[in-house]
Every structure is written in structure tokens, then in C-alpha cells.
Image: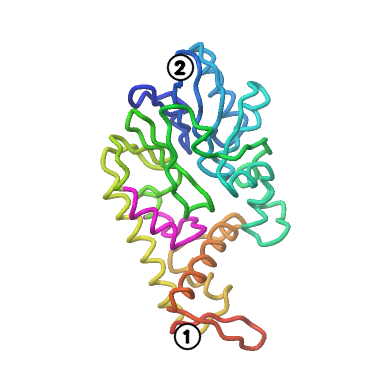
Amino acid sequence: MLELIHVKGNSYYFASPAKIGLYRISETDVVLIDSGNDASAAKRVLRTINERGWRLVAIYNTHSHADHIGGNAYLQKNTGCRVFAKGLEAAYTNYPILEPLTLFGAYPPKELRHKFLLAEASVAEPLSDAVLPQGLSLLPLSGHAMDMVGFLTDDGVAFLGDALSSQETLDKYKICYIYDIASYLETLRGLPEIAADIYVPSHAAPTEDIAPLAQYNTEATLAVAEDIVALLATPKHFESLFSLLLTQYGAPLNFQQYGLVGSTLRSYLAWLKNERRIDVIFENNFLCWKAI
């Protein structure tokens, strides 16, 4: 775990549950793309960097979810490296309590305040083209998170963050976390248009052809939407719909799933309402959703 893999040229990644990209900007200086899920992972990353005689100068975060920024604080404290994140992702990186708060919709219970959903705060600066080193460019990839980005190196390696999930993950869970369904689908449509030789998703195997996996993700996302609409043939309030959907997918419920899948279901409902496929009625002091 956390083995450093050479992809091409100056582009590397650490094999971990959420891949950590590494790009050499000089003989001695390197930058990271994300930092893993906690200080323990960050320690091993820094040990490898030091053993090679390199110096970490910056971390560029794809987005602010805890498994991608969890090592920021340790690395920043121990190297003085700068941290950069795009738009609202910078706010969430500076104030990580916003992630479980967003999922729960209010101050989160302790079951949502753990390292997988609540990273240690780090000092993040605004990410833009102007602060990128030569050889690294931004890829807008919003949808999974509010202002998620990827990075393309001059070696032709595209680091895609959580722009899509592996086929195994989709087959197992059916529904994966998405903040904005419309933006997510737009990002999936655009992935094959990125001119790269190798694509490195955070949670799927690197590939030279991203189109088949992007299409699989698109079909899986749309299939969930159809299942929701079908369940709303008769009006249902949120909790009833949530229970029926998880039962249909054979997914057990716990607090973390309640936050992640519940938030995603609300995103689907908002998108389907905007698309005028569903609407709401108020019945016995319940807000109920129904197919049109």
C-alpha cells in the first residue's frame, strides 16, 4: 500500500485507496495531487519523498473530501508546503466540518465526525492556473463535488480525482456520492475529450481509454434516476423513498450511508424536479415527491 508508481516522465502516483498523484517540477522539487486520508498515509508518502532526495513544495487538491485532503495538515506542518484548492473546495479544506455538516444538513452527530468524513484543517489558498507549476494544467470536473478539478501533466497523464467510479464499485453499491447530477453527467461526457495518454482516476485502475468507464458511469447514474422515478409513481416522502431505494439495491443502512446516500438522493430529486420529471405535494404535513 502507498507504493510509488511511475506512470510516465515526471508523473507518478501512490497506490492507495484514493490515489495520490506526484509530479516532479525539477530535479529536487515535487508537488502532490491530493494527500490521502490521514496523517498515517501522509507520513509514508513523505518518507518516500525524502528517501528519494526530493522536496515537497505544494499540494494541489482535486476536491475537499476527507479521503483526498486527510494528509494535508501533517504534510503542511512538517514541510511548510503550500496547499491549493479550487473555489468552495478551498473553504471546505480550511473548515472541514463543512463536509459532514453538508451531508447531514445541520451540525453533524459524532457518527459523521470521523476521519473518513472530517479531515484535520489545513490552510488552503485559492487554486488557479496562475499558481500551477509549468507542465501542469487544470481540468474542470465538477459534479461529484462542488468545484472539483483534475490535473493534466505535460507527460499526457490526466489525474481525474473522483470524476467517475470503478465498475466494481457501481456494481456493488449502485448509487455513489454525487453533489450535482447535471454537472456530473456533463463531466462524464467530457472525459473522453481530454487529450491524454493515460487517465488516472482516484478509485479506479489507470487506463489508456477512459470512454468505456465514462459510459458505464453515465448509464449507472441514469439508471438510478429511472429507479427513483419509478418508485415515485405514487407520492412518497423522503424517508419512505430512501428506504425503498436502499432495499431495492440491497444496501444496509448506517449513519455514514445515511449521510452520503441521503445527500445524493436529494441531489437526484433536485435534478429530476428541475428536469420536470417529478414534482412535490404537501400532504399531512409531509413534503412528498411524485412522478409527473
**Secondary structure predominantly adopted by residues drawn in magenta:** helix
- Residue 221 location, x and y as percent? 39, 61
| Residues shaded magenta | 171-191
Q: How is the image coloured?
A: rainbow
Residue at x-position 38% and y-position 57%: 186
Report which residue position mark 2 lands on.
Answer: 26
> Does residue 116 sit above or below 235 in this rendering?
above
Residue at x-position 64% and y-position 47%: 92
Horizontal relation, residue 103 to residue 61: left or right: right
Q: Say which amino acid is labelled 1.
A: Thr
Report which residue position mark 1 lands on.
Answer: 234
Relative depth, front residue between 112 and 42: 42
Count of labels in the image: 2
Please identify the quarter of the rendering in which residue 240 is found: bottom right
- Residue 266 location, x and y as percent? 54, 67
Figure quadrant of the C terminus:
bottom left
Q: CA distance from mark 1 to mark 2?
A: 61 Å
Residue at x-position 55% and y-position 31%: 59
Q: Say which amino acid is labelled 2.
A: Ser
